[in-house]
Image: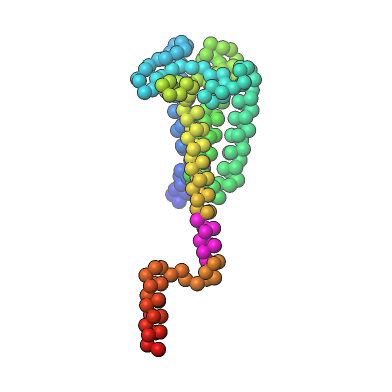
Amino acid sequence: MKEKLLSGLKWFFRSFIWLGLVLLGLDIFTKQLIMSVSNGQLGVLADWGIVRISYVQNEGAAFGFGTGNEVANRIIYLIVATLISAGLITYLILKRKETKLFVRAALVMVVTGAIGNMIDRIFYGPLQGKTGLFSGKVVDWIDFDWFWRYVFNIADCCIVIAAFMLIIYIIVAEVKDYREKNKNKVKTVNDGQKVLSKSEKEKLEAEKAEKEQSK
């Protein structure tokens, strides 16, 4: 019983489901807090110089991107987010043992970000003064207005950070492959012979010179 419990905890930790749940909970909590504190009034709630807390209802995709049509944006986002989430979850289930922990964490963060903003669009309509499901807009509140014009949220951060993690992983993997290929080329050129260091070469040349002098 104890071994099964430890095995389950190990699987839960290595699956990074806990990370997704923590980030999703934090995303939902902060959005609810912003809507509660603002009393439904959009705009800047606090200004701390480097960062501002601004309540914005985003009808587009991440960072305000979209088609300009609220209904189209909502439908496109829900379809794309659902497909991406379903695809990544399926991949994580089928390839769990083969996926590196670093990549697994990044993929879980992408799914978390997609689900976090999807919840806004499905359930937050009544909280934003509208009626019915699928009438809500994404709640954004993190505002670095002095260098970035778009307001974002924790779900957006998850997606962006995960993207950088995957880019870093790909770069590191490519560098490793390049070095491995070069090693193989060196081995092929030397036909299995040992590659001598500078000191070893000098020693062999000295020994060869001594033999020639003794003749």
- Vertical arrangement, residue 79 with respect to residue 176, above or below: above
Q: Quadrant of the C terminus?
A: bottom left
Q: Residue 54 location, x and y as percent?
A: 43, 17
For the question of whether residue 17 can be seen, the reply is no
* Residue drawn where x is 47% and y is 12% of the image: 42
Which range is magenta?
179-187
Q: Residue 139 location, x and y as percent?
A: 50, 20
* Residue drawn where x is 39% and y is 68% of the image: 198
Q: Residue 6 location, x and y as percent?
A: 44, 48
Query: Disc count in the image?
Result: 0
Give whichever of 215, 129 is nearer the camera: 215
Q: Main secondary structure of the magenta part?
A: helix
For the question of whether residue 68 can be seen, the reply is yes
Is residue 180 located in the magenta-colored stretch of the structure? yes
Q: Residue 117 location, x and y as percent?
A: 54, 25
Give whichever of 31, 184 is nearer the camera: 184
- Vertical arrangement, residue 213 with respect to residue 160, above or below: below
Is residue 144 located in the magenta-colored stretch of the structure? no
Give whichever of 158, 30 is nearer the camera: 158
- Vertical arrangement, residue 146 with respect to residue 17, above or below: above
* Residue drawn where x is 40% and y is 84% of the image: 212
- Vertical arrangement, residue 169 with respect to residue 61, above or below: below
* Residue drawn where x is 53% and y is 19% of the image: 58
